[in-house]
Image: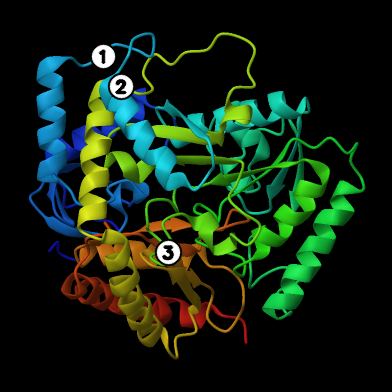
């Protein structure tokens, strides 16, 4: 456990301060670092990581929801080592047994009939590919996206992102129209009950479509918005959307980069909370399946996946090493029912955090599903989002030996993002919650005097 730090002290060694200086000298200014004194993580095991100073932390963010099962999972490290000893790279120009094996498993798990799978190196590239497929299939560059959304950092993905914190340019190769529904407790429909909320959002979608040429390519949506602060609509919204989309031939892309593989506990994929109208036409995934290896992918029914009429390959997508890691990681996930563990331990953690937040003016809402939990913070006595509160909690939690993330819409970064590995134990959940409870009280005490009477 690290010691508390004063606002003007830097307890890091000269070596760590030098590394930070070197980072700033050669890497972009917009490449954000967490913490006033950024830390270098050197190794991990299970749900814990260690920094270069030897301090141990309980990891509640998993490298942005990427360490899905555990740090240094023996099955994954063994698979990587054994594959690396044989061959590291071939490209998609050659038959690749680990890639075919993983594609077979992902296709079967996806719920999409007659599915085809294309592997990429990231979630951004996966969403970029999904947009290429949808626009080529529909012969249209019009895309529907959700407000408060995030889909990656490529030019096309930034162009459909509905969160200005992550939109460095207004230029785009796509015409994007933004739909209501991704945020349940803020916005013009927040006062409605769930059924009325869905009805209002569907009416908004229909009105939006009435203003287009009628050949919109696709709706892309995260079942739970990640960067936007772990917000989600009522179950069934996207099923209601899908009924409208199908009337127009519009495709549904479910961005499962953060929600896939059982993280929400209740479902293996986020879209399954909205399955009344069937599976999506296209599903994208990344992050957790590689447990830290660089992997993403797209699943689509054959007629959509095969619509491209020009050559295409992937140099690094489907790498034998990443495929071997993902296969081993997926086997561990399924054999140990980590989806069930996310449901059970996640429910405990959510209730514990709600109890810890009771009576605190700094906490507006604790929300989430499974081990994908958001804590929205405000200036006490107001409903105003408070990035300052989130920074105080994040820094204080680090001092207590806990790593968490941040997010939120409208450039606020006022939501704590909690997404530990799916193997989190009940004891570790309690330990992390205790640290967060203390950090929340610290933020409450520091900010209470700043609220306007």
Q: Position of residue 105 (x, y in %)?
A: 35, 39
Residue at 63% over, 62% down? 276
Q: Nearer the viewer, mark 3 or mark 1?
A: 1
- Which disc number belongs to residue 319? 2
Q: Circle 2: is it few (<14), some (14-19), or many (20+) Cα within 10 Å?
A: many
Q: Position of residue 425 (x, y in %)?
A: 19, 69
Q: Determine if residue 173 is in view.
A: no
Which quadrant, please, contains the C terminus? bottom right
Asked whether disc 2 touches disc 1, contact meaning CB atoms under 8 Å apart, the reply is yes
Q: Nearer the viewer, mark 3 or mark 2?
A: 2
In the image, 303 versus 15, the foreground residue is 303
Residue at 50% over, 52% down? 227
Q: Which residue is mark 1?
A: 89
In the image, 184 versus 49, the foreground residue is 184
Left or right: where 190 falls relative to 299: right
Residue at the farthest bottom position: 359
Q: Circle 3: is it few (<14), some (14-19), or many (20+) Cα within 10 Å?
A: many
Inter-mark Cα distance, 3 to 1: 38 Å
Q: Position of residue 319 (x, y in %)?
A: 30, 21
Left or right: where 112 falls relative to 1: right
Inter-mark Cα distance, 2 to 1: 6 Å
Q: Position of residue 35 (x, y in %)?
A: 33, 52
């Amino acid at each position: 456990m690290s010691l508390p730090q004063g606002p003007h002290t830097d307890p890091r060694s000269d070596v760590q301060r030098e590394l930070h200086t070197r980072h700033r000298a050669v890497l972009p200014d917009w490449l954000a670092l967490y913490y006033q004194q950024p830390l270098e993580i050197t190794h991990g095991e299970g749900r814990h990581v260690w920094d270069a100073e030897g301090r141990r932390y309980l990891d509640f963010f998993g490298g942005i929801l990427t360490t899905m099962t555990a740090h240094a999972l023996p099955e994954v490290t063994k698979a990587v080592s054994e594959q690396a000893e044989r061959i590291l790279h071939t490209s998609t120009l050659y038959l690749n047994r680990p890639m075919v094996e993983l594609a077979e498993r992902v296709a079967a798990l996806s719920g999409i009939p007659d599915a085809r799978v294309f592997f990429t190196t990231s979630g951004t590239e996966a969403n970029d590919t999904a947009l290429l497929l949808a626009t080529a299939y529909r012969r249209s560059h019009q895309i529907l996206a959700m407000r408060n959304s995030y889909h990656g950092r490529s030019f096309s993905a930034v162009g459909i992102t509905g969160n200005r914190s992550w939109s460095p340019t207004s230029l785009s190769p796509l015409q994007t129209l933004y739909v209501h529904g991704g945020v349940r407790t803020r916005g013009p429909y927040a006062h409605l009950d769930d059924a009325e909320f869905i009805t209002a959002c569907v009416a908004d979608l229909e009105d939006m479509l009435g203003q287009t040429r009628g050949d919109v390519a696709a709706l892309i949506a995260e079942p739970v918005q990640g960067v936007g602060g772990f917000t989600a609509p009522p179950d069934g919204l996207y099923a209601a959307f899908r009924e409208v989309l199908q009337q127009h031939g519009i495709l549904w892309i479910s961005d499962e980069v953060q929600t896939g593989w059982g993280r929400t506990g209740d479902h293996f994929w986020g879209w399954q909370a909205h399955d009344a109208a069937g599976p999506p036409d296209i599903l994208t995934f990344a992050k957790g399946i590689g447990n830290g290896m660089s992997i993403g992918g797209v699943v689509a029914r054959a007629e959509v996946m095969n619509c491209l009429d020009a050559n295409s390959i992937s140099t690094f997508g489907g790498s034998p090493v990443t495929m071997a890691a993902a296969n081993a990681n997926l086997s561990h996930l399924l054999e140990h029912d980590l989806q069930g563990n996310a449901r059970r331990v996640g429910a405990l953690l959510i209730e514990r955090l709600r109890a810890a937040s009771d009576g605190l003016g700094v906490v507006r809402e604790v929300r989430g599903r499974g081990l994908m939990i958001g804590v929205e913070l405000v200036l006490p006595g107001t409903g105003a989002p408070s990035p300052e509160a989130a920074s105080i909690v994040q820094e204080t939690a680090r001092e207590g030996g806990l790593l968490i993330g941040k997010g939120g819409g409208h450039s606020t970064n006022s939501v704590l993002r909690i997404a530990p590995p799916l193997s989190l134990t009940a004891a570790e959940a309690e330990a992390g919650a205790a640290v967060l409870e203390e950090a929340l009280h610290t933020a409450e005490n520091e900010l209470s005097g700043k609220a306007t009477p």
